[in-house]
Amino acid sequence: MNDYIIRATAANDSIRAFAITGKNMVEEARLMHETSPVVTAAMGRMLMAGAMMGVTLKGKDDVMTLQIQGEGPLKGITVTSYPDGFVKGFPLVNDVILPPKNGKLDVGGSIYPGFMRVIKDMGLKEPYVGTIELQTGEIAEDLTYYFATSEQIPSSVGLGVLVNKDCTVNCAGGFIIQVLPMCTDEILDKIEENLKNLPSVTNMLQDGMTPEDMLNKVFEGFDVDIMEKTETGFRCDCSKERVERSLASLNKKDKEEIIADGKPVEVRCQFCNKKYEFSIDEIKKLKN
Ligand code: ZN
């Protein structure tokens, strides 16, 4: 199954919802960044959340950044998402090993305490920036809190990544449910009841459930309208020119040392780890 996102409305348009299956993108990110299981899970949750939030961007050139920064050993993750459903991202530390917590990967323990930040660049003078304090570091709870406090949208977020014993990704997926102003208390009570009884995302995926099935389960007893199905995945748009910009921060002394050294310089794209080589001639041509 390819990775995809669905957008839906439910209960007579009083709720909007997103659901994703993202096993391939999370596995791709794992291979690129050589992540340990707990980092794979944290990175995967961030990528899938970013992808679902990205498709809500309105302009085709809009870009969103979802970032966590914390005092835990993982230190932070940055994800950039685009309106077409594609994302890229990287962890600051890729090889964190922590003992499991309640039999699960301790994503919260790898990052908490800290902050989550959402930056939406919509081509305006100033980007929109929303920052919250991490509630648990488990990502889904933090996003729920972010939506409630920064965007004033009551939401429920579920995200899950299951990692196999050999460290590969078994399944990955999630959903975002958002309550619109016309939603009644009656509808809300019933959906809260459904959410309370909902199996974990990874249990649902392991049972073979699709994003459509997950939303049908969340909205059991209501009508669900699938509005759109969008392909999603990991995509880095780096190029030699873009990477060259990071070399522009070299000071004069560093540059002279590199030239004196006489060896080509290898620069890696932080988002996908692709290597770009710069010859001494190219380094000499940099305007710094
Ligand atoms: Zn790249």
Image: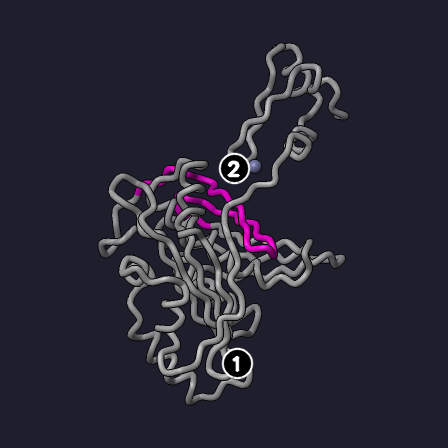
Question: In this rendering, is residue 130 above or below 260?
Answer: below
* Span highlighted in magenta in the image: 70-97
Residue matched to label 1: 13
Residue matched to label 2: 272
Numbered disc 1: secondary structure: loop
- In 3D space, how far apart are the residues under numbered discs 2 and 1 (Cα atoms)? 39 Å
Residue in the picture at 29% in, 74% down: 197
Tell me: is circle 2 under 8 Å from ligand 1: yes
Q: Is residue 253 left or right of residue 287?
A: left
Between circles 2 and 1, the one closer to the viewer is 1
Residue 281 covered by magenta stretch: no
The way the protein has been coloured in the rendering is one colour
Q: Which mark sits nearer the N-terminus, 2 or 1? A: 1
Q: Looking at the image, which is closer to me, 183 or 74?
A: 183
Question: In this rendering, is residue 128 above or below 219?
Answer: above
Q: Is residue 133 left or right of residue 241?
A: left
Per the rendering, the mark at residue 160 is none
